[in-house]
Amino acid sequence: MIPTEAWTLDAQGWLHGAQRLPSPFQDARAAGMQPELLVIHNISLPAGEFGGPHIAALFLGQLDSAAHASFASLQGLQVSAHFLITRKGQIQQFVGCQARAWHAGVSSWQGRAQCNHFSIGIELEGCDWLPFEEAQYRSLQQLSCALLAHYPQLRAIAGHQHIAPGRKTDPGPCFDWPRYRDSLQSAGWDRLRWSDQTG
């Protein structure tokens, strides 16, 4: 776990204390563009299996598509997220928050398309049919607070399912939105805009 005093970001939006694994799948945000939306995802490779190296390999462009039958469709895929929170609550970072990660795909929020331009993507190691771990909620709360403090324009939170309805389902029905929202409100972040689906 990251020590409490280390939950800060540098000028390029890299979190101090996170495992840094720079992804080639990123590019620059438009001039003057700052993060305004936090997008929560889930991911597991293979689906429903945890603890392996495959998620990081995917985001680094190093996934062996022959390692599992389900990986064939991922061959050549160029995708990344800013952060991954493992089942143990460990945080890996693949893209600095000042840059654009390729996590949202075809998406829209409050009438604005292409959410990658103005969002930060956080992947939780998980799936739609299993609960997330206590350690993940703790790390997500602390990471979210650090991001909200660092980026004054960051005032909205949604799931991938909310910005790409019908195409994506994550973080899924097992993600506890009220718990997450309450954890941020208890930390003083009570003026956030949440997707209508979060209650």
Image (spheres, rainbow, N blue to C red):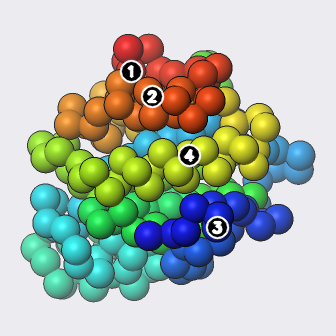
Q: Name the residue beneath numbered marker 4.
A: 144
- Identify whether 134 is placed above or below 44: above
Q: Is residue 89 left or right of residue 99?
A: left
- Residue 23 lies, with reference to residue 196, above or below; the image says below
- Label 1 vs 2, first from the N-terminus: 2
Residue at mark 1 to residue at mark 3: CA–CA distance: 29 Å
Mark 4 crowdedness (10 Å alpha carbons): few <14, some 14-19, many ≥20: many
**What percent of the width, then of the height, locates residue 157?**
53, 32
Q: Where residue 136 sits: x, y (%)?
A: 34, 54
Give the position of the C terminus as an image quadrant: top left
Q: Residue at x 18, y 84 (%)?
A: 66
Residue at mark 4 to residue at mark 1: CA–CA distance: 16 Å
Q: Is residue 185 left or right of residue 124?
A: right
The numbered dot on residue 198 is 1
Say which amino acid is labelled 2. Answer: Arg
- Marks 4 and 3 sit apart, C-alpha to C-alpha, by 14 Å
**Which mark identifies residue 6?**
3
Q: Residue at x 32, y 57 (%)?
A: 135
CB within 8 Å, label 1 to label 2: yes
Q: CA distance from mark 1 to mark 2?
A: 8 Å
Distance, label 2 to label 4, CA atoms, is 11 Å
